[in-house]
Amino acid sequence: MSNSPEHIKTLIIGSGPAGYTAAIYAARADLKPVVYTGLEPGGQLTTTTEVDNFPGYPEGVDGPTMMVQLQQQAERFGTDVRIGMATAVAFSKEVGGLHRVTIDDTKEVVAETVIISTGATAKYLGLPSEQRLRGGGVSACAVCDGFFYKGQDVAIVGGGDTAAEEATYLANICKNVTMLVRKDQMRASKAMQHRVTSTPNIDLRYNTEIDEVLGDQVVEGLRMVNNQTGAKEEIAITGLFIAIGHKPNTEIFAGQLDMDDAGYLITEGKSTKTNIPGVFASGDVQDKEYRQAVTAAGTGCMAALDAERYLATIETEA
């Protein structure tokens, strides 16, 4: 490693809607932001074919195009976007202290402020047919993509509160929702279970798992298997929603930043401040409730403003 690491005023780790929005605001505030994109430049939206619910796109936009445009907007104001992944961090606990971040295990940089926008990764079942049809009818977000299946037959996998909530959401707009729960009971709260069982167009299947997602280019059906009897059944569907949880991308921050039991970063009040001065968190890495592109972008804006105010305070005290 270099003996004299690069000095950065505002380092942004992650390049989804939160990271790029933070970059836009930070660049306009002359914080000279540097963005390291991570392994998936553009974040989860790069795996989404259509985005219909982000303000400003009356005809909708595909996810990769939207992320390219956000990057271009950030670069227009002077953001330095780099391909690379933060692999280690050493945060200073002192107000005004410099934070050390290692990129790709080889390069070390120091930053006056750090905005973490590493997001969360949706959990999938891991079936080859499921992975092949991601973006072709397989989705991990009913609120994002359910509209495209209005009046159609769909299926959802999961037994927790999120799965129950998304199943009832889909039931309002879809013809029929088949809900697959691999155990003999749901993990969801009693209230959420009641919502599911009292919704007439939700076909709840216990002890049931996916054997195969059917279709070549798009989802055309589902082969289910009863994990108690081994009996298999095929149904025709056009959309499959996986609702078995998300995993926040926070491993490298363990032991330094406060997290909840699921690994999401904890921020102070309505701010994006973490427990470390000068380190802020935005987007899905600190949001397990909404997980939308527009809310991620909003917290990216907040993080940049929090960073700007933090630096102004440091300069005033100096």
Image (cartoon, rainbow, N blue to C red):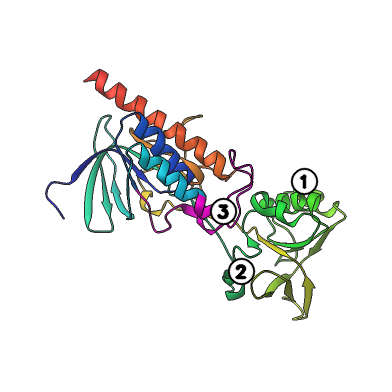
Q: Which mark is residue 133?
A: 2
Q: Which mark is residue 191?
A: 1
307 sits left or right of 121 in the view: left
Q: Report if the CB atoms under discs 3 and 1 are less than 8 Å apart.
A: no
- Distance from disc 2 to disc 3, alpha carbons, whole Å, reads 16 Å
Q: Which residue occupies the foreground of this view, 125 or 151? A: 151
Q: Which mark is residue 277?
A: none
106 sits left or right of 66 in the view: left
Question: Could you classify mark 2 by the number of other residues whose Cα lies within 10 Å: few (under 14), some (14-19), or many (20 or more)?
Answer: many
Percent of width and height locating residue 113: 31, 36
Badge 2 marks a residue whose secondary structure is: loop
Residue 183 found in image quarter: bottom right
Q: Name the mark nearer the viewer: 2 or 1.
A: 2
Which residue does the numbered mark 3 point to in the structure image?
Answer: 62
- Mark sitting earlier along the chain (2/3): 3
- Distance from disc 3 to disc 1, alpha carbons, whole Å, reads 36 Å
Give the residues in magenta: 36-65
Q: How many marks?
A: 3
Q: Split into 4 quadrants, where in the image is the C terminus?
A: top left
280 sits left or right of 109 in the view: right
The residue located at (65%, 76%) in the rendering is: 216
- Mark sitting earlier along the chain (2/1): 2
Question: Could you classify mark 3 by the number of other residues whose Cα lies within 10 Å: few (under 14), some (14-19), or many (20 or more)?
Answer: some
Q: Does the magenta segment cover residue 69?
A: no
The residue located at (46%, 42%) in the rendering is: 18
Taken as a whole, is the magenta stretch helix, strand or loop?
Answer: loop
